[in-house]
Image (cartoon, rainbow, N blue to C red):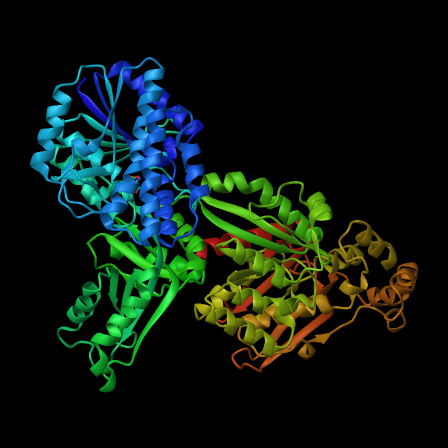
Amino acid sequence: MGTIVIKFGGKSLANGTGLNNVLRIIKNKQAVHENLVVVVSARGNTTDQLEGLLETAKQKKGYTTALNNLKKEQLTPCHSPELEQDFTALEDILKGVSYLGDYSPKIKDEVLAQGELFAAKQVAKLLVKEGIKANFVDSRKLIITDSSFGDALTLEKESQEKVLDYFNNQEANTVNVVTGFIAANTAGETTTLGRNGSNYTASLLANYLNASEFQNYTHVDGIFTANPDLVADAQKIEQLSFNEANELANFGASILHAKTILPLVEKGIPLRILNTFNTNDNGTIITKNNTQKGIKSISVLDDVSLVTFEGRGLLGKVGIDARIFNALSNNNISVSIISQGSSERGIGLVIKTNRATDAILALEKEFETDFYKRDVNKISVLDDVVVISIIGQELNDFHKPFNALIKNQITPLLFNNTITGKNVSIIVKKNQLNKAVNVIHGQIFGVAKKINIVIFGKGLVGGTLINQILSNTKAILKRRQIQLNIVAVASSKKVLLNKNGVSENWKIELEQNGIENYTTETIIEFAEKHHLENLIAVDNTASAEFIQEYIPLIKAGFDLVSSNKIANTSSNEFYIQLREVLKENNKQYLYETNVGAGLPLIDTIKLLHHSGEDIVKIKGVFSGSLSYLFNTFSTEDRPFSEVLQEAIDKGFTEPDPREDLCGNDVARKLLILARELDLVNELSDVNIKNLIPEPLRAIDTNTFLQSLDELNAPYQELKSQQKSGNVLRYIGELSGDLSKSNGAKLDVKLVFVPNNSALGSLKGSDSIFEIYTKSYGENPLVIQGAGAGAAVTARGVFGDILRLIEKS
Ligand code: ASP
Ligand code: MG
């Protein structure tokens, strides 16, 4: 095989695993490749340390400790007199700088160059120690540049000559360990190729030597769809083209800097990005071939500020952009993104934060007279912003990720797609970065959409729901690409928080690790802190107070699902306010289980009503417990108390059955249905037949449960009035003129109905709802089935959660 060039970055060369792996990798390759060219960066963050030493010396501060630490690091694992000498020379320079209180770019290059020199010497020595033929190669003898210290320009012809000259005279099977980053001008003075320049050195060598491949060893597996530190679901990109790589380079992937890629493109040399710490991975390969699908990747530009230029009088006039750019470029300030928003917002420019103040000054100076003329009204700067770029994203497909951002309460400050065709960039506040990147990534790559659920109430319905969700998580992930995550379970006393989702042991965990004295704010803060997206709050309490938390939750970005009926049956004012807040915040509220448990009732009524069908009456047995009670009592010859006791024992009633018998629950359901039809009513408008005899209403629960016999006489008396072929039913009825918002008649009553009618033939604890409409006349739409019980209610709540996800 021909020549291959491999380059190791600073992290790979640090003492320990990195350096050990580097040696192993070189050894393995040397066995199969005739000519191995190894390019090294400075080890660890030596370059930064050297820069720091220079600054300290310049400020005449003590640098000895830092220098000694660096020396210790660099002389490990191999100690040599030569390296000792290099340090003495370095110390001499620092002394000089300290004496003068200043240093030139030339001196800086001389100092920074030491990092690569130490590294290459160390690696070559270690290889020789292991019995491998290896040379230390000082690239200052190979790469010749102009004299722009700090960012020197390569003189191609001279460099190529020197490189060929050197390598042509090398024996085969020798590993040449070359310093990256550093070069020399024609006078032989040290220059550098700019930060991260080792990549460039390696690609120049690859070009000159016609290498078959350039392998760049880093500390990551390759190029990802997004930074894996930010997005857990980020995927590695196996292959991309130079064109695509170039796009990525513009947005911060320094490995792929255009300067690095060009020499490779010229000769069609593939670039492979590999991981020193995970040598089993094939990495990402970049070749001249275009991939068919086109790649997409999300990258982030940090440490930037947004400068906003507002000039109503100037915008639209010719030459303004040019003046802005001139003013900035005269001050060496580069603009990474520009966006011309609406005329109100003016022009937005993204620049490095450390240049923000200079930029403002430059612009203020340039537009001084325009300020006086009030053509320019404001130049302002916003720090702590980040640019998120989606590379390979066509603008016309961007609405989905964009909507997802808005849904998650992230409003981009600026939006841009003008740099090069297939990129979209947005600017968001830094504290929204994590959430924003995850939302976008989830949308673009169709990887599982994460839904973060907070469950209030862990009683019968709440507990059942949690277990239902947990046992279906896997199946839903597989079938629907939705990752359900219960991030909080709250009882009235404690809350269990877990950003990765609670486990089957949630009950014990809540007991042991639950936070006491929590408020809703505790949960909201938790969600914010962990950047949780797609939030759903589920209310499975029966609490009247808890509904006060709905509005703060909505404002904090939660959609709501509730089995609690209180919110929909408290004052009409609250009912309307809640819906307004939902609308303002673009949030949903689903409560199918409020009436008829899991039966699709609310949805059906909504659908009929919104499609313009006139509903003229709704009538039915709304309560499962009372359905059982009268279905049984009407047809069996048993005392009322016995049937009631049976219903209690079977768990069909509330612990205190008077909560069912008083009729309020049925009244609430009736009111909820009425309000779905835009009728304006309060709970007090419902005429309720209370099934509890007066004397039994105020006593405590236990006394009541002891006194069930007292119900027998009145109900036996009622039953004696029952004609043959009739049965008793406790029903809710919505009638009157439903076309008028105040025309409804709401009744909850105990009635006789023929046993062969729909209501009369009801069995067990089923519920039935008859919906009468104008076009169907006397034939109502009937919805009937199990309308109560924790399991069906929990199922219904679960259904709401899934529907909500579908809608968003
Ligand atoms: N050591 C230099 C730097 O840190 C060059 C490189 O790592 O590529 O910028
Ligand atoms: Mg329902």
Residue at 66% of width from left, 47% of height from top? 464
Q: Is residue 452 left or right of residue 50?
A: right
Residue 659 lies in what quarter of the image? Answer: bottom right
In the rendered image, the residue lying farthest to the bottom is: 373
In the rendered image, the residue lying farthest to the left is: 157
Give coordinates of residue 122: x percent, y percent: 34, 26
- Can residue 785 be spotted in the picture? yes
Give coordinates of residue 153: x percent, y percent: 15, 44
Give coordinates of residue 120: x percent, y percent: 30, 28
The residue nearer to you, when weighing 690 against 2, is 2
Residue at 61% of width from left, 78% of height from top? 681
Q: Is residue 237 above or below residue 482?
A: above
- Can residue 274 be spotted in the picture? no
The residue nearer to you, when weighing 205 against 124, is 124
Residue 401 lies in what quarter of the image? Answer: bottom left
Residue at 52% of width from left, 56% of height from top? 535
Q: Is residue 490 above or below residue 40?
A: below
Q: Is residue 124 left or right of residue 211?
A: right
Residue at 33% of width from left, 30% of height from top? 85
The residue nearer to you, when weighing 55 against 580, is 55
Q: Is residue 497 left or right of residue 710?
A: left
Quadrant that contains the C terminus: bottom left
In the rendered image, the residue lying farthest to the front is: 99
Quadrant that contains the N terminus: top left
Give coordinates of residue 728: x percent, y percent: 75, 63
